[in-house]
Amino acid sequence: MQMNSPTIYALASGRPPAAIALVRVSGPAAGRATNILCGKDLKPRRATRVALGDPGRPIDDAVAIWFPAPRSATGEDVLELHVHGGRAVLAAVLHALGHVEGLRPAEPGEFTRRAFENGKLDLTAAEGLDDLIHADTDQQRRQALRQLQGFLGERAELWRRQLIEAAALVTAQIDFADEDDVPEDLLRPALVEIRALRDSIRGVLARAGHSERLRDGLTVAIAGPPNAGKSTLLNRLAQREAAIVSPHAGTTRDVIEVYLDLGGYPVTLLDTAGIRESSDPVEQEGVRRAEARAASADLVLWLCDDQDDTAPRAGAAPVWLIRTKSDLHGDRTAFGKGIRGFDISARQGDGVPELVAALIAFASDTFGGGEPALITRTRHRDLLEQCAVALDRALASEVIGIEVVAEELRGAIHALGRLTGRIDVEDLLDVIFRDFCIGK
């Protein structure tokens, strides 16, 4: 790809101004850009202080690093310029690069796509890199880093090689059955290998749980009648004034969303309008939205400030009963049988730590807080399921004919190849890489 691809450049660090900024250049004309802007050749993989400039126009006192192909992040010639991160400096650097023959600005995800196309990482690792860039919590970071380091990709590639070996035995049985030096029954050991691989993949699918949902997070709706303390609890959990708190009923008219990091797990809290009968059309719409969001949430915290220990069902989501204003009501009766409940004072903070601990435990159970999951995206699950189904059919096809077994094995190998991006994934690449930032 090095000789045919255009050379691209982009800011690869955060938005200016900043102390230091990184500008990356990748492609066959990166050497030309090095000579023009740095004024000299650079020793490979060594940070070199340079007087960066356009011909006749100094730009910055910078550090440059030259990575010749193929030992670079993209597999191409790469120049990295570490410059001062002011807007004027960056504008001058990018302007100078734009006037080097053969260079053009990079598109979103183009650096990572080139790394994939040049075999520097597989598709699951590229997805892991994207997830790592967008990780907001520690659990998301850990999961993304595992994928970037090949947690799924290496296992899938091992399965693919083992299936290719099994398919080779089946093909030899078909093509060379009449040869004297070919064993009479190659299908039996192939089926043993296929069954073991099928069981392994099925085990991964069974253990995956909801780990792929960790990328999007958990949704918790705070619902209940007016003046039950919903907005006060939201502000307490968010540790800031995210919602208006008022003694007047109907203050919250729309759904307020607050994103939280609870124990490393991403959680979106929804403060909803007080649910009651109203003749006000605006409040009616707020109640309708509150009921709709509660019905689609993963968990509902139903708030009340009296002794009532009942809470309405909210679709399929579990409902916890939160009795608020404990500082005003004193001792209360125990919750009814089968009710998950908490007595809290959102204003004073009493009982809130216990509620937070329960929310963290709920998130851990939802996201699969035990053994790290191989599957982190729906795409992974779908392709592994396709592979497992093809292996099921291969095992069931033994009595039908060995040719059918061979065809099903080809389908299973194809599914694993699509998982890592080794074969036939051109239609997926634009979708996957378009959400990357420009410098990646």
Image (tube, helix red, strand yellow):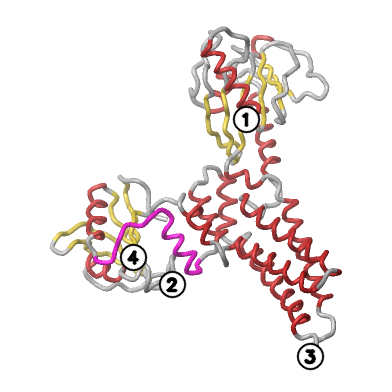
| Residue that badge 4 annotates | 7
Name the image quarter holding the C terminus.
bottom left
The answer to whether residue 348 is visible is: no
Label 3 element class: loop
Name the secondary structure under disc 4: strand
For the record, the magenta segment spans 101-120
In this figure, which residue is indicated by the disc labeled 3?
179
Q: Residues within 10 Å of mark 4 (few under 14, many from 20)?
A: many
* In the image, residue 234 lies in the stretch drawn in magenta: no
Quarter of the picture holding the N terminus:
bottom left
Answer left or right for 281 relative to 207: left
In percent of the image, x 59 and y 17: which residue is there?
287
Mark 4 or 1, closer to the camera:
4
Q: Position of residue 51 (x, y in %)?
A: 21, 63
Q: Residue at x 29, y 50 (%)?
A: 85
User: Which residue is the site of mark 1?
Assistant: 220
